Image (cartoon, helix red, strand yellow):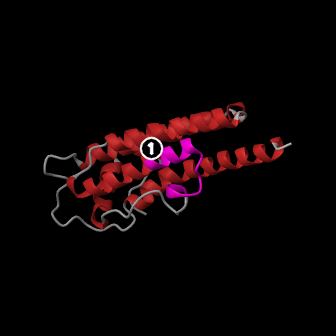
Amino acid sequence: MNSGKHRKGEVMNIRKIAIWAGIVPVALGATLFAACGGDDNGGGGGSGSGSDEDYVAAICKAGLNFTKDLEEVFKDPSALADEKKAMEKLADIFEDFANDFAKAKPPADLKDWHNDASKQLKDGVKQIKDGDLESGIFAGDTPFPEPPAEAGERLQKAAESNEDCQEADFAFTE
């Protein structure tokens, strides 16, 4: 029978998603602003886009909700007993995070990066739903494209006074 072999593959898929569940918020914080420098113009976004504070608040809230939702699933081992249902639940959690992330209004200097990162997250959700945990965002070290280098410190300042960022232990700089 294949049931033992199939079950092993299912457990591996859940483990792989669990690992990525832990990596996504960390990768977001570290990669989002891995190379940080000062902001030359001294201002935040502009051109009618989101403010640094609002963007940070939205990203940290999305990350905190994502983490709490995952903790809720993983604290009940019976929720993972049925592989198909577990994968669906995890896909839903990733999808909620991807949607919340996409809704954040970035400052002007992060608009292109944000759109690219949002697309990659949504592609990752599709991969989870399709059972493809080997390519796309799951193939590399981070699911996010390289961000603009100059935004990190500026957004980190906004994060320092944001309760969701503090609770999620989320940082925009290394």
Q: Is residue 164 visible?
A: no
In the rendered view, tell whether residue 37 sits above or below residue 71: below
Residue furthest left as drawn: 47
Residue sitting at x 25%, y 67%: 38
Q: 10 left or right of 165?
A: right
Residue furthest right as drawn: 1
Q: Is residue 141 visible?
A: yes
In the rendered view, tell whether residue 85 sits above or below residue 124: above
What number of labels is visible? 1
The spot of residue 132 in percent (x, y) is: 58, 50
Location of the N terminus by quadrant is top right
Q: 118 left or right of 5?
A: left
The one of 72 and 117 positioned closer to us in this rendering: 117
Residue sitting at x 66%, y 48%: 13
The spot of residue 97 in percent (x, y) is: 44, 41
> Mark 1 sits on what residue?
63
Q: Secondary structure at mark 1?
A: helix
The spot of residue 109 in percent (x, y) is: 23, 58
Give the residues in magenta: 123-138
**135 drawn magenta:** yes
Q: Main secondary structure of the magenta part?
A: helix
The one of 7 and 49 positioned closer to us in this rendering: 7
At label 1, the amino acid type is: Gly
The one of 161 and 71 positioned closer to us in this rendering: 71
The spot of residue 168 in percent (x, y) is: 47, 45
The one of 110 and 9 positioned closer to us in this rendering: 9
